[in-house]
Amino acid sequence: MESREQLENAAAGWLFKRDAGDWTESDQQALSAWLEISSARRVVFLRLEHAWREAARLKALNAGAMTGQPSWTGPAADAAPVVQPRRGGLWRGALAASVVLAIVAATWALLPQRSTYRTEVGGMRLVSLADGSRITLNTDSEVQVAFEERERRIQLRRGEVFVEVAKDPSRPFVVIVGERRVVAVGTRFSVRRENQDIRVVVSEGLVRMESQSPAGALGPPASLLGAGSIASGDRQGVLVQKKSLNDVTQYLSWRAGFLMFQSTSLADAAAEFNRYNDDKIVIESAGLAGLKIDGNFRSNNVDAFIRLLGKNFPVVIERRGHTIHVLDP
C-alpha cells in the first residue's frame, strides 16, 4: 500500500515531466499504465493536476526552470517516478521539484474535494480522507464528502457512518442529516440516519449537535455531547443519554461485524438483522415482539440467530422465500 506522500511525489513527478515540453506518446502510455494500478493513484493525480492549474505561480516557476531543465523518464507501472537532473541543473531541478510539491500540497489542501462513497446491504467500507480523517460506512449506507477551505463536510444520505476526525481547529468536521448538523474538531463518533431521525454515539472527544434552521427562524438550542453520550433526535427535539463504555461498545459493535443485544426486544433485534441481510425476519405477533433477548451474533448470519431463537424460545419458524416468519406455537 503506497503512502499518501509516495503518491503525491509520484503524481508531482508526472505533472512536472508533462509540463516540461517534451511529453511523448510513450510518456502518456506510461502515465496511463501507472494510473491503472489503483484508484488511489488516479484520485491523487487528478487532485494534484487541479491544484497545479489553480496555482498561478507554477507558470512562472516552470518558465524559469527551462534552462538546465531536468531530464526525466517515466516509471514502470509499479514504481514511483524519479527526477534525474542533467549536470549543471541539479540544484535548479531539485529546488523546482520541492517548490512544486510545496505549492501543490498547499493548494490541494484548500481545494473543494467532493466524493461519494456507498455500501450495499451487508457491506462495510473504510475510507481514508485527504485530511487524515477516516470514515467507516455501515451496511446500506451512502455519504457525500465535500472538503472546502473553511469546513470539512459529510452529507449522510442513508445508513450509518463512524467518523475518526483528524484535528484541524480552522476547519471543523460536520456531518449533516436532514436538518441536523453534528460538528466536531477532533473526535470519534457515529451517526445513524433513519429517514429524518438521527442517532449520534460519541466514543471519544466532544461534538456539538445543532439544527439547520431556515434563515431567520429560531431553531432548538445546540446539544454538547461528550464521550459516552448517545443522542437521538427528530424534527421535534433531541434526547441525550449518558451511557457506560460497555453501552457505547454495544452500539458500535457493527464495526467488528457483530450485533450485541442486552435485554433487547425481539422486534428491535429483528430490525437490526434486517438491515444487514436480504432475508428479512417478520415477527407475527405483538407478544413475541416484546420478548427480551441477550447475546452477540454475526450481523450477516441470520440463520444462526433464527436457529438459536427456535431452540430457546417458544416460537415457530417458517421460511417463505426471502422472509423468515416467527409465529406463536
Image (spheres, rainbow, N blue to C red):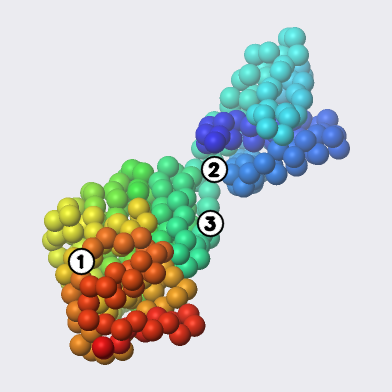
Q: Nearer the viewer, residue 142 or 145?
A: 142
Secondary structure state at the residue bearing disc 3? strand
Amino acid type at mark 2:
Trp
Q: Which mark is residue 39?
A: none
Lower position in the chain sequence, tag 3 or tag 1? 3
Secondary structure state at the residue bearing disc 1? strand
Left-right relation of 93 to 28: left
* Identity of the residue drawn at 68% across and 32% down: 78
Lower position in the chain sequence, tag 2 or tag 3? 2
For marks 2 and 3, give the one nearer the viewer: 3
Marks 3/1: CA–CA distance: 41 Å
Image coordinates of residue 206 in percent, x first then y, are: 22, 52
Using the rendered image of the protein, determine whether residue 318 is visible from the camera's viewpoint.
yes
Q: Quadrant of residue 29?
A: top right
For marks 3 and 1, give the one nearer the viewer: 1
Secondary structure state at the residue bearing disc 2? helix
* Identity of the residue drawn at 28% across and 49% down: 187
Q: Which residue is mark 1?
A: 294
Q: Nearer the viewer, residue 78 or 122?
A: 122
Using the rendered image of the protein, determine whether residue 201 is visible from the camera's viewpoint.
no
Image coordinates of residue 325 in percent, x first then y, are: 37, 84
Crowdedness near tag 1: few (<14), some (14–19) or many (≥20) residues, C-alpha within 10 Å: few
Q: Which residue is mark 3?
A: 114
Crowdedness near tag 3: few (<14), some (14–19) or many (≥20) residues, C-alpha within 10 Å: few
Marks 2/3: CA–CA distance: 12 Å
Amino acid type at mark 1:
Asp
Q: Which residue is mark 2?
A: 108
Where 167 falls versus 183 (above or below)?
above
Amino acid type at mark 3:
Arg
Left-right relation of 230 to 59: left
* Identity of the residue drawn at 53% across and 52% down: 113
